[in-house]
């Protein structure tokens, strides 16, 4: 931004100027939803519904989506009871 300001302040600008700005890239969570569910399930005795809501907030998903993932993990014996 400072470079653009310096450049256009030095010379007379005629007409319109278009400035394209890209947003910051979204940082991906370090863990997948499945990994987060497994880790938190091992570390706590929190009910699955509450755990799903917590993981959903961390990953930007709905609680029902995360709960469905947790149920699939349980069906395949990949999630501790």
Image: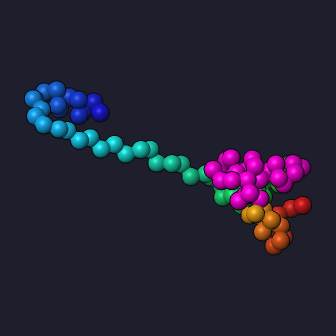
Write the start and end of the magenta stretch as one range. Answer: 45-67
Q: Which of 23 and 79 is in front in this view?
A: 23
- Residue 35 visible in image: no
Query: On the rendered image, what quadrant is the C terminus found in?
Result: bottom right
Which residue reaches farthest top? 9
Q: Which colour scheme is used?
A: rainbow
Say which residue appears at 10% left-offset and 34% top-offset.
14
Say which residue appears at 73% left-offset and 53% top-offset.
63
78 relative to 56, above or below: below
On the image, the x and y values in percent for residue 17 come to 20, 38
On the image, the x and y values in percent for residue 41 come to 83, 54
27 relative to 70, above or below: above
On the image, the x and y values in percent for residue 13 come to 12, 32
- Magenta stretch contains residue 60: yes
- Magenta stretch contains residue 22: no
Main secondary structure type of the part rendered in magenta: helix
On the image, the x and y values in percent for residue 68 come to 76, 63
User: Which quadrant would residue 76 be assigned to in this image?
Assistant: bottom right
Which residue reaches farthest bottom? 76
Q: Nearer the viewer, residue 22 or 35?
A: 22
- Residue 72 visible in image: yes
Say which residue appears at 34% left-offset and 42% top-offset.
21
Tally of numbered tags = 0
Query: On the rendered image, what quadrant is the N terminus found in?
Result: top left
Q: Is residue 40 left or right of residue 1?
A: right
Q: Is residue 78 left or right of residue 25?
A: right
């Amino acid at each position: 931004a400072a470079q653009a300001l310096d450049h256009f302040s030095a010379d007379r600008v005629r007409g319109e100027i278009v400035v394209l700005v890209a947003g910051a890239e979204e940082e991906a969570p370090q863990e997948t939803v499945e990994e987060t569910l497994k880790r938190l399930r091992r570390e706590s005795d929190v009910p699955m519904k509450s755990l799903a809501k917590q993981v959903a907030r961390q990953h930007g998903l709905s609680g029902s989506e995360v709960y469905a993932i947790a149920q699939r993990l349980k069906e395949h014996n990949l999630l501790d009871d």
